[in-house]
Image (cartoon, helix red, strand yellow):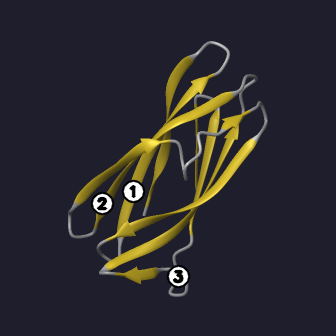
Amino acid sequence: MANKISEGVEIEVETFINPTTVIRCRGAHVCPTGITIWNHNNFSVKLHRRQWHIFDSNGSHREVEGEGVVGVQPILQPGEKYQYVSGCNLHTEMGKMYGSYNMENRIQKISSKVNIRCLR
């Protein structure tokens, strides 16, 4: 598990990598990933965008970005958390990824970047 707090938002990422959870499909290794986002601020925040950098052990790199997460742009009230499960497609058996979320302070309408630790 990897946790990081940035801009009052805590991100916990847990990968479920073992022989029974990694799915092999068309040469890719799909690794399920559970993500929990906590709002430790005294104001609500909205997750607008995500950006992930994915590196395979063969040196290839790709970037995944887009609106929200799993089709949702969650709004978290103070003290609330949001959880979802996603997946990372690796072209090799090993790799790493890191990323960020673009979050908005709903009172001041200011956006900030919340970093997500590197996962291996």
Mark 2 neighbour density, 10 Å: few (under 14) some (14–19) many (20 or more): many
**Tag 1 and tag 3, C-beta contact below 8 Å:** no
Q: Is residue 3 left or right of residue 112?
A: right
**Cα gap from disc 3 to disc 2, whole angstroms:** 19 Å
Say which residue appears at 62% left-offset and 31% top-offset. 46
Which element type, helix, strand or loop, lies under badge 1?
strand
The picture places residue 7, in percent across and down from the top left corner, at 58, 28
Say which residue appears at 54% left-offset and 48% top-offset. 69
Name the one closer to the observer, 104 or 13.
Answer: 104
Q: Which residue is mark 2?
A: 55
Q: Amino acid at mark 3?
A: Asn
Looking at marks 3 and 2 on the same chain, the residue that comes earlier in the sequence is marked by: 3
Q: Is residue 95 left or right of residue 72?
A: left
**Tag 3 and tag 2, C-beta contact below 8 Å:** no
Q: Which residue is mark 1?
A: 97
Q: Which residue is mark 3?
A: 18
Which element type, helix, strand or loop, lies under badge 3?
loop
Which element type, helix, strand or loop, lies under badge 2?
strand
Residue 80, placed above or below residue 36: above
Name the one closer to the observer, 84 or 38.
Answer: 84
Q: Residue furthest front?
A: 71
Figure label count: 3
Q: Amino acid at mark 2?
A: Phe
